[in-house]
Amino acid sequence: MKLTAVLLVRNQILLNKYNYNSYRPIGTITETIDRLQELQVDEIVILNKGHSNSVVDDFFGLFKDTNALRSISTPLAYGGGISELKQAEKLIDSGVERIVLSACNVSTSLASSVAEKFGEQSIIFHLPFFFKDKELTFKSGHREHKSEQVTKALRKNYGGEVILTSIAAEGLGEIDVEQVGNAIKSIPENLNVMYSGGVSTVSQIESLANLELNGICLGNILNSKEIFIPIVKRSCSKITRTLNLESLDND
Amino acid sequence: MKKVGILDIGYGNIDSVIGSLKTIKVPVARVKSPQAVLDAEVLILPGVGSFGTAMELLTKTEIAAAIAKRHQDNQVILGICLGFQVMSRRSTEAPDIEGLGIFNFEFERLPRPQIGWKSVSSKSLSGLTLDHFYYFNHTYGSNASSDDQFGVARTSDGLLALASTGRTMGTQFHPEKSQKTGKAFLSWFLEDFAK
């Protein structure tokens, strides 16, 4: 199981999230990525919450130049505003390992064309979820999707992994592990699953680690406590890549 | 350190590989023609894309033949992920398209994509300590049995992580995305394997 840092940005500013839809700015992104790499985070996902037509171009504006982007030696995924294959091509050619698409893109021609060109492992589907009258429901923007529809579409093999984000837990730090387990059961076996939403303690990670997860996403906690990454790596046996202390000391 | 040519014919995460090599002070250039493939001191085949598309591009540009000649002439080659897979006989990703055939095994679709960090171990490679974790991101893999003509390294679940024959090596993992251990691997490859 891997530890993934999720960074939210808008207009080239790093955001802190509280509740599901509220944000406050907290600074720029490049130094944050440098520190996360030093702390040996396993992967970085950047989600751009901007609404303009140039959201993907804004992503490149996060970095001083192309050298800053391509010298990132940690697997990097990006999501936000991707609507065309050529945008995915530009991102992957520039050093982004994987792209993140929303629930409404699970079976679109965009997903199929990216999967055909770069392989299905190059796509992560971001699936915020909640339970509506006890029925698992996924969300993309303001649209809601019944879990059966999404599950059926996911079987088309256009993606390699999903991020399940608990809307109820997002920004609050309270995770219903049983609900997470039920959401994981809806994901076909051909896909890996990461969880995000409200993760802020080692004990939460240990509870989540008992589920069939390929990764756990850390968000807000990293804004106030980056050292949380090595703490988890040292104390949770389910994290695959243990801490390389020699490498950490050299930084 | 030897100058590296990175194959740039329209597939692969070329910029990441270039960025990683630059951070360890390796001179690097993009190569786009069969002659440039033959002339490079060290050739790297980068690794993001699909098997069929990559092989079609390699064949159309006549670079496939140049890579095969390079291998026959014992010139150094490193294939990363897809760059490794195209050096095999074939992949079920595009079963009707032949690979370069440098490695005498095939790649098959895995039950689910392998995305994450794995430790790698080897009994047959000397001079390389592979006791750290490397980043993998692939849907097709091989668990080919060990063959005397190959040096191999495997992940803990038995999949091929690396294979070498002569002065040609392929890695299923992405050294350019494996932080410091990946840079250490690239340094070893260029200083020792490619010596």
Image (cartoon, rainbow, N blue to C red):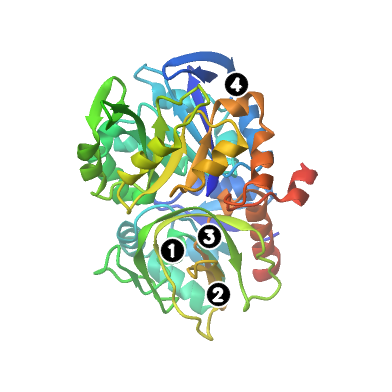
Mark nearest the camera among 1 and 3 is 3
* CA–CA distance in space, label 4 to label 2: 43 Å
Amino acid carrying mark 1 in the image: Pro
Look at mark 4 in the image and give the residue it sits on: A28
Q: Chain of mark 3?
A: B
Q: Residue at x 43, y 63 (%)?
A: B34
Please identify the quadrant where the C terminus of chain A is shown: top right
Judge left or right: residue A32 versus residue A138: right
Secondary structure beneath dot 3 equals: strand
Q: Which residue is mark 1?
A: B34
Q: Residue at x 60, y 21 (%)?
A: A28
- Viewer-nearest of labels 4 and 3? 4
Q: Quadrant of residue B138?
A: bottom left
Q: Are marks 4 and 3 on the same chain?
A: no
Residue A99 in picture, x, y percent from top left? 40, 39
Separation (CA) of disc 2 from disc 3: 18 Å
Give the answer, above or below, for where B65 lies relative to A69.
below
**Disc 4 crowd, CA 10 A, few/some/many (<14, 14-19, 20+):** some
User: Mark 4 belongs to which amino acid?
Assistant: Thr
Please state which of residues A104 and A180 is positioned toward the viewer in this rendering. Answer: A180
Q: Residue furthest right?
A: A249
Disc 4 is placed on an element classified as loop
Q: Whole-percent x and y of residue B160?
A: 49, 69
SS assignment at label 2:
strand
Q: Which residue matches tag 3?
A: B44
Q: Is the residue at mark 2 from the same chain as the one at mark 3? A: yes
The three-letter amino acid code for the residue at tag 2 is Val
